[in-house]
């Protein structure tokens, strides 16, 4: 209908994932126009930094899962092991970008000078060794072992579980991640679940009940700054009835950093002080990029398609309204004269 001129514009919510490859092909052929920007949904790898079993204390020689993710160097190494750019190019047809944090690179609030952690196996191996994980047999088919890792028993293999909701593209991405991590001596067991089972509410749910090692999921960025995911007061526990403080327990990773807490509290209290708010937003963005409480894989692409003779249509990170610039949209000969 777009190609024939019966439809002028198709809004992004009507563009399914399985249409993306065809849209790229048609756009490259010049039969339609495609407008693309990072959307408001994030695909992330969440670390189970503090499982619920640690709430009564972490027992090194007990039944608690080893404290794999407490050291930021290990989280950084896992990030460097994953070819996020390859995933985007191969499975999203290049219609997204490797995120720096929770803001697109073109967002006016983004921190200048940041660059994403591109895949770098050598850097990942350096970080793992520095964190105390050794690869004595130099065989990537076997996991590294703990030699001098804080709070982990000597000889513990770097091996953990990876949970996903069973779906086409997510399964493809997860399998590539598992293969990537194996190159760094990280052994991952992939488990696929029905979404209703994986996303079951706390305390019984695996994700929101903090009963997972690593998990891949989508998260809606209703606010540009998702402090609720990282501030320690939003960690769901039995003591707060699994609801955190105000967000319903969004910090299901169990991440805690006093600098992040202070920055997020300052954002909440900034009022009309825009200068303070922006400074603290950028502090949060820096912490997400450097401390890696989770690994942002990609933003779901927001794709709008239109007739080839449409002009003046723009996408804007600051607005959810596609037609906010309606008076500037035109078509046909008017577009030629504007050019």
Image: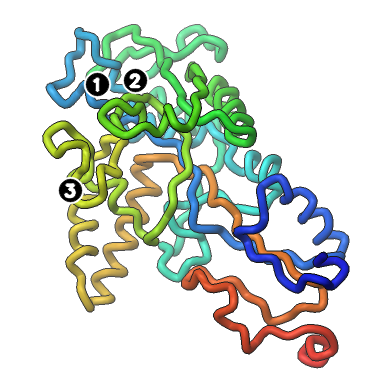
Earlier sequence position, callout 3 versus callout 2:
2
Q: Name the residue that disc number 2 marks.
A: 132
Select label 3 or label 1 by which is in front. Answer: 3
Question: Is residue 265 toward the left or the right of residue 161 in the image?
Answer: left
Label 1: element kind: loop
Q: Which mark is residue 150?
A: 1
Residue at 80% from the left image edge and 90% from the top image edge? 334
Label 2: element kind: loop
Occupied quadrant, residue 244: top left
Q: Which mark is residue 106?
A: none
Q: Do the numbered discs 2 and 1 sit on residues whose CB atoms are within 8 Å?
A: yes
Label 3: element kind: loop
Earlier sequence position, callout 3 versus callout 1:
1
- In the image shown, does 251 or 156 lie closer to the viewer? 251
Using a 10 Å C-alpha cutoff, classify the residue at mark 2 as few (fewer than 14 neighbours), some (14 to 19) or many (20 or more). some
- In the image shown, does 148 or 339 lie closer to the viewer? 339
Occupied quadrant, residue 9: bottom right
Residue 336, image x, y percentages: 83, 87
Q: Name the residue that disc number 3 marks.
A: 245
Number of labels in the image equals: 3
């Amino acid at each position: 209908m777009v190609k024939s001129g019966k439809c002028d514009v198709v809004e992004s919510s009507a563009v399914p994932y399985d249409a993306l490859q065809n849209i790229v092909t048609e756009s490259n052929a010049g039969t339609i126009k495609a407008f693309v920007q990072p959307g408001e949904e994030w695909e992330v790898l969440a670390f189970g930094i503090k499982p619920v079993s640690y709430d009564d204390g972490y027992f090194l020689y007990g039944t608690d899962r080893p404290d794999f993710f407490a050291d930021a160097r290990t989280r950084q190494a896992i990030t460097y092991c994953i070819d996020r750019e390859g995933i985007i190019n191969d499975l999203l047809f290049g219609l997204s970008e490797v995120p720096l944090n929770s803001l697109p690179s073109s967002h006016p609030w983004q921190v200048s000078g940041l660059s994403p952690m591109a895949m770098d196996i050598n850097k990942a191996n350096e970080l793992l060794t520095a964190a105390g994980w050794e690869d004595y047999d130099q065989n990537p088919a076997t996991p590294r072992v703990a030699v001098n890792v804080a709070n982990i028993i000597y000889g513990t293999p770097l091996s953990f579980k990876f949970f996903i909701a069973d779906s086409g593209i997510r399964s493809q991405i997860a399998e590539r991640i598992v293969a990537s991590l194996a190159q760094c001596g990280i052994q991952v067991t992939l488990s696929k679940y029905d979404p209703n089972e994986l996303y079951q509410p706390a305390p019984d749910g695996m994700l929101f009940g903090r009963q997972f090692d690593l998990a891949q999921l989508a998260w809606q960025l209703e606010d540009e700054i998702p402090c609720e995911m990282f501030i320690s007061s939003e960690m769901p526990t039995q003591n707060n009835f699994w609801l955190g403080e105000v967000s319903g327990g969004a910090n299901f990773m169990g991440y805690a950093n006093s600098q992040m807490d202070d920055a997020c509290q300052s954002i909440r209290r900034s009022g009309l002080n825009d200068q303070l708010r922006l400074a603290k937003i950028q502090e949060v963005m820096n912490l997400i990029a450097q401390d890696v409480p989770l690994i942002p894989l990609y933003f779901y692409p927001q794709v709008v398609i239109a007739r080839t003779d449409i002009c003046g249509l723009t996408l804007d990170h600051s607005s959810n309204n596609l037609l906010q610039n309606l008076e500037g949209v035109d078509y046909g000969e008017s577009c030629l004269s504007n050019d």
